Amino acid sequence: MIRTLVVDDDYRVARIHAAHIGRVQGYECVGEAHTAAEARDAVARLEPDLLLLDVYLPDEDGIALLRSLRETHDVDAIIITAARDVATVRAAMRGGAVYYLVKPFGFDQLTAQLAAYRRWRTEAESRLISGQNDVDALFAARHAPTPAPTSRGLPPTMQKVLDAVRSAERPLGAQDVSELIGISRPTAQRYLSELERKGRLELTLEYGTTGRPVNTYVVRPGA
């Protein structure tokens, strides 16, 4: 089992990612951390193999955290962030990240990358290097194949919203989806409403202690 630690400052996003990792073959989520300080403590205690690591942490840049952790621990990281600038991508590569996922991304994409990382670890432990072709194959194995176009004609962001709701262990509202895949709350609500209209999601009402109920959504059976 690949022991994985989720590091994200958003508690709800971290919880959803942790639940998803627990359902991926060959993976075990050993914990969550929401600050760099918590991550350092968790890495020392839990000795994870892999971090699912956000860049934006309240007390330290996630890439700087990765660089310092790798000085004393044998741990890999998949970066998850909304940052799209070349400087951040290059810093992640120099810091030792095995992959870089740009938000918003679908859970199918995350699952594919986790599967690729598992294959890469297996090959890295067993492959005999006899020449450049073997080296090239080992480097290439870290990356998941480019995903095929989504089925049934959904736009990419709408598909990511659907994937997020499908992978969650509880009904999600617009705020949950907004924080999870990195889009605005109004945009999340628009896609959720459209997916309900298309018959892909079902609307449920979540009642709190006070105030109006919150619209939340689950996947319609068979969708």
Image (cartoon, rainbow, N blue to C red):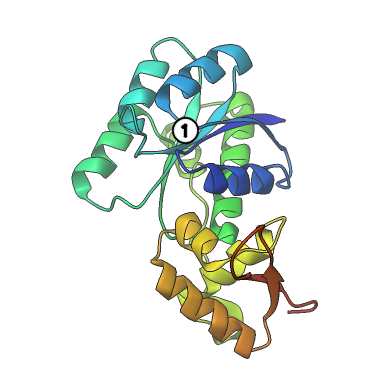
Residue 192 vs 50, above or below: the answer is: below
| Residue 70 visible from this viewpoint | no
| Residue 50 horizontal/vertical position (percent) | 55, 30
Nearest the eye: 220 or 63: 220
- Left or right of 120? Residue 37 is left
User: Helix, strand or loop at disc 1?
Assistant: strand
| Residue 202 horizontal/vertical position (percent) | 70, 79
Residue shown at 43%/28% (left/top)?
A: 35
Residue 135 vs 85, above or below: the answer is: above
| Residue 57 horizontal/vertical position (percent) | 37, 35
Residue 63 found in image quarter? top left
Nearest the eye: 53 or 211: 211
- Left or right of 170? Residue 42 is left
Nearest the eye: 161 or 76: 161
- Left or right of 138? Residue 205 is right
Identified by mark 1, the residue type is Ala
| Residue 203 visible from this viewpoint | yes
Q: Which residue is mark 1?
A: 77
Q: Quadrant of the N terminus?
A: top right
Residue shown at 44%/36% (left/top)?
A: 98
Which residue is at the far top? Answer: 72
Residue shown at 34%/52% (left/top)?
A: 82
Residue 192 vs 57, above or below: the answer is: below
Residue shown at 34%/39% (left/top)?
A: 56
Which residue is at the far front? Answer: 210
- Left or right of 223? Residue 32 is left
Q: Quadrant of the C terminus?
A: bottom right
